């Protein structure tokens, strides 16, 4: 069963229950009022009749037999006077002195005490009659006055009221069913559009979004659905981009490994198949060792690059830049590499050391043997500047791509893997920073690692310290 059908049924059921309960209560109360009014009218007539009868007879001081006749006379006179839709009967000691009622009221009602009114409703031949009996005392004698009134019209009114109430409930049900179904279907129309959008997205239209045209819960659901779709689309794009990068990286890796592996195979075959002297064998072994070391460097850097590209979390800790710089000085000396360090930095020390080392190696390889490489270390930045050959402007945007080389022959001759700047960029991004390259042919290159996230961390750390000081 569809949702709009369920909601319509629930709305109709609740509405009909409320309307039916209200109409039943109203019709029952109104019917009771109608019957009560008809009975009260009969009681008022009885009171008026008896009062007039008693006062008329009591004003005549006559003997008993004459008084009985007088009672009958006055009773008959008043009975004819009030005869409209009313039938009167008079009994004395169980005998009728006068009787207009078409039925036998004495057999229907039993009167025991004077002052006790007895009444009931009876049905004869499809009509309803309200019969009352009132004992009265006149001159020490007990008489019983019976009044029979036709209340069929009152009961007919109650029946008509119930029929009209039932008809009103039926008409209300039809109206509520039509209106509710239309309103519910209109209210749930965005849900149907959302379903269609979901089906089309599932079919491959990932750029499709659900339209939002209201401000209700359905609109909130549509917004959430669109946010979810955006997140899925972003994830798909990231996976696609990552897959493409891996394909390119593997293709480039296969191409890069081809050269050292060809060298290893060629020199190994020479050792096995060709008659070589000791100097030639040593040359082959050195070439095999060089090719193997280059393959090992490619493998090590590629493994680190892949781990960073997978988004693995790194543990950032503050460390002293002076000790960091001393370690670099021991590795490169002070002749060609000038290092200036101040303060401390927050980050993964080993990764940042690898970044700095790669930048220095690139600067040294791109510079003459007598040129100087300047390294600046601060809490916000790592900067390596040289005055070497420089990089043409059209190559700057691509030098951070894996295995990309500006001068392929010279890079291989110097033992480069083409992964250094790619690895530096990945390390910078893992720290929430960027790698900035400024270069011009013949004027040298300046590479800066700007650690944006670390700057924010330092700011909030200072702010936290100020708050603690104030407390």
Image (cartoon, rainbow, N blue to C red):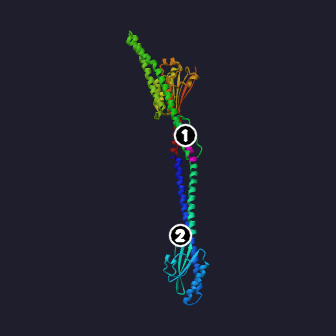
Question: The residue tagged with tag 2: helix, strand or loop?
Answer: loop
Return the mark for residue 196.
1
**Label 2 to label 1, Cα distance in Å?**
68 Å
* Residue 126, magenta (yes or no): no
135 in relation to 261, above or below: below
In this picture, residue 327 sits left or right of residue 391: left
- Residue 441: x and y in percent read 58, 20
Q: Nearer the viewer, residue 427 or 54?
A: 54
- Residue 220: x and y in percent read 55, 45
- Magenta highlight range: 185-198
Badge 2 crowding class, 10 Å Cα cut-off, few under 14, some 14 to 19, many 20 or more, is few
Q: Nearer the viewer, residue 181 or 49?
A: 49
Marker count (numbered)? 2
150 in relation to 431, above or below: below
- Residue 455: x and y in percent read 53, 35
Question: The residue tagged with tag 1: helix, strand or loop?
Answer: helix
Q: Nearer the viewer, residue 237 or 203?
A: 203
The reply to whether residue 33 is visible in this rendering is: no
Return the mark for residue 123.
none
- Residue 226: x and y in percent read 55, 40
Q: Nearer the viewer, residue 212 or 350?
A: 212
Badge 1 crowding class, 10 Å Cα cut-off, few under 14, some 14 to 19, many 20 or more, is few
* Residue 191, magenta (yes or no): yes
Q: Residue tagged by mark 2? A: 125
The reply to whether residue 49 is visible in this rendering is: yes
For the stretch drawn in magenta, what is the main secondary structure? helix
Residue 208, image quadrant? top right
Q: Residue at x 53, y 79 (%)?
A: 134
**Among the two numbered marks 2 and 1 on one chain, the one whose residue lies closer to the N terminus:** 2
């Amino acid at each position: 069963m569809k949702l709009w059908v369920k909601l319509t049924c629930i709305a109709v059921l609740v509405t009909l229950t409320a309307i039916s309960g209200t109409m039943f209560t109203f019709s029952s109360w109104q019917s009771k009022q109608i019957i009560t009014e008809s009975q009260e009218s009969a009681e008022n007539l009885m009171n008026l009749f008896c009062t007039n009868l008693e006062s008329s007879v009591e004003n005549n001081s006559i003997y008993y037999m004459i008084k009985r006749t007088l009672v009958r006379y006055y009773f008959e006179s008043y009975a004819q006077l009030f005869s409209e839709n009313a039938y009167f009967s008079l009994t004395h000691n169980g005998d009728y002195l006068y009787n207009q009622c078409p039925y036998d009221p004495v057999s229907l009602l039993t009167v025991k005490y004077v002052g006790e009114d007895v009444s009931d409703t009876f049905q004869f031949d499809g009509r309803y009659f309200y019969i009352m009996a009132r004992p009265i005392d006149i001159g020490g004698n007990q008489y019983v006055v019976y009044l029979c009134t036709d209340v069929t019209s009152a009961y007919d009114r109650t029946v008509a009221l119930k029929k009209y109430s039932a008809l009103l409930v039926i008409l209300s049900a039809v109206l509520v069913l039509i209106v509710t179904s239309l309103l519910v279907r209109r209210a749930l129309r965005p849900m149907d559009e959302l379903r269609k959008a979901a089906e089309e997205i599932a079919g491959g239209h990932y750029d499709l979004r659900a339209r939002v045209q209201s401000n209700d819960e359905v609109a909130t659901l549509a917004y959430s659905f669109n946010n979810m779709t955006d997140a899925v689309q972003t994830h798909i794009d990231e996976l696609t981009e990552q897959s493409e990068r891996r394909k390119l990286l593997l293709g480039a890796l296969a191409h890069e490994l081809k050269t050292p592996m060809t060298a290893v195979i060629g020199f190994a075959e020479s050792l096995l198949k060709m008659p070589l002297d000791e100097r030639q064998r040593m040359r082959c072994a050195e070439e095999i060792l060089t090719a193997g070391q280059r393959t090992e460097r490619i493998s090590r850097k590629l493994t680190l690059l892949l781990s960073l590209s997978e988004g693995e979390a790194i543990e950032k800790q503050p460390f002293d830049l002076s000790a960091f710089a001393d370690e670099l000085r021991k590795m490169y000396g002070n002749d060609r590499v000038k290092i200036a360090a101040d303060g401390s930095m927050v980050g993964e020390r080993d990764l940042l050391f690898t970044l700095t080392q790669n930048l220095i190696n690139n600067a040294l390889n791109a510079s003459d043997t007598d040129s100087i490489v300047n390294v600046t270390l601060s809490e916000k930045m790592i900067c390596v500047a040289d005055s070497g050959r420089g990089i043409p402007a059209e190559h700057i945007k691509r030098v951070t791509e894996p295995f990309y080389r500006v001068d392929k022959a010279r890079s291989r001759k110097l033992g480069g893997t083409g992964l250094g700047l790619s690895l530096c960029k990945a390390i910078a991004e893992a720290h929430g920073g960027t790698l900035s390259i400024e270069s011009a042919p013949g004027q040298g290159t300046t590479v800066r690692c700007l650690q944006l996230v670390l700057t924010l961390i330092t700011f909030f750390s200072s702010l936290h310290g100020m708050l603690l000081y104030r407390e």
